[in-house]
Amino acid sequence: MRSVLGDRRAIAVLLGPALLVYTLVMLVPMGWSLGYTFFKGNVIEGFTFGGFGNFEKLWHDPQAHSALWFTFKYGIAVSAGQVFCGYVLALLYVFVLRRSSAVVRTLVFFPVILPTVAVALMFQKLFAVAPQNGLANIALEGLGLHHGDWFAGAGGSFIVLVLMDVWRSMGFYGVLIFAGLLDIPDETLESARLDGATGWRLIRHIVLPLSAPVLLSSIVFSINGTLKVFDSVLALTNGGPGSDTTPLTLYMFRTAFSYGDYGYGSTIASLLTVVCLGVTLIIFRFSRRDLTKG
């Protein structure tokens, strides 16, 4: 193995095809998109060089600011819900259900494979108010509470969006974190119990630090997925009411493909790339803390 790793020609032969495919599939489109940010127009009308005009427009665009704020708000709320619910499910699988958790895991994981449009239609029916109340409003009225049209305002639409995406994906994070918890040696847990660490103390001082790598991976997966949300919003609210639930991805799509402004759409896409990269770097920076030190 050392002789192979020391041979530059062998390294080039082994890694060259993968690097070539990665460059063609990932880096070239990104560079092409970045180049569009300096132009105005589209493939039908033609392009004209606009310098930094698209970036200046983005800086002063209130719709872009609204979309960026919604993207951050949605990403934080849904990621917190996904990872928290996934972690609770994983603890339930390992410490309560144990070997009989396979059926529960399958049932909770089932929404992950459902089409987004089908899930969105189901949640529209659950929270409907006309022509008849959905189950959510029936349950609230049974508790003496009343809620009007969930999709008529930004707050109600945001709550339904968060509930839908947390419900749909918490099974995936439950299985992902469950696999990480299985790597914790039984001897370590048993030793901690003999030392008097049970319940929350066992989770806080033993399970949580030892599961930090898989927890970090879950957070990175979740935050990057939610910052790039598109299909859920399009299927459930179409960005409405008005533009109150429009994330950057949907605003970018409409700008580039509905209004034919490729340059400004690429500028919005570049902003989203910078946001995802910045958030990921912040998470990795924070993860360097030693969780075992209180």
Image: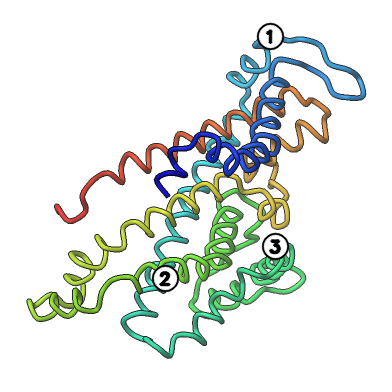
Asked whether 53 or 61 is in front, the reply is 53
Q: Which residue is denoted by mark 3 in the rendering?
A: 116
The residue sitting at 65% across, 60% down in the picture is 149
Q: Is residue 52 above or below residue 102?
A: above
Q: N-terminal of the two: label 1 or label 3?
A: 1
Q: Which residue is denoted by mark 2 in the rendering?
A: 179
Q: Amino acid at mark 1?
A: Gly
Q: Amino acid at mark 3?
A: Thr
C-alpha span from label 2 to label 3? 26 Å
Asked whether 98 or 6 is in front, the reply is 6
Q: Is residue 59 above or below residue 103?
A: above
Residue located farthest toward the bottom when viewing the structure as drawn:
100
Instruction: Say what secondary structure mark 2 lies in.
Output: helix
Q: N-terminal of the two: label 2 or label 1?
A: 1
C-alpha span from label 2 to label 1? 50 Å
Q: Residue 213 got which mark?
A: none
Name the image quarter holding residue 125. Answer: bottom right
Instruction: Say what secondary structure mark 1 lies in.
Output: loop
The residue sitting at 69% across, 30% down in the picture is 28
Q: Residue 33 at what x, y percent from top left?
A: 70, 27
Q: Amino acid at mark 2?
A: Ala
C-alpha span from label 1 to label 3? 39 Å
Task: Tell whether 51 sits left or right of 76.
Answer: right
Residue depth check, mark 2 versus mark 3: number of the one nearer the observer? 2
Residue located farthest toward the front when viewing the structure as drawn:
3
| Color theme of the render | rainbow
Q: Residue 6 at what x, y percent from top left?
A: 43, 38
Q: Residue 168 at what x, y percent from top left?
A: 58, 67
Q: Which residue is denoted by mark 1 in the rendering?
A: 51
Graded by Cα atoms within 10 Å as few (under 14), some (14 to 19) or many (20 or more), the crowding at tag 2 reads: some
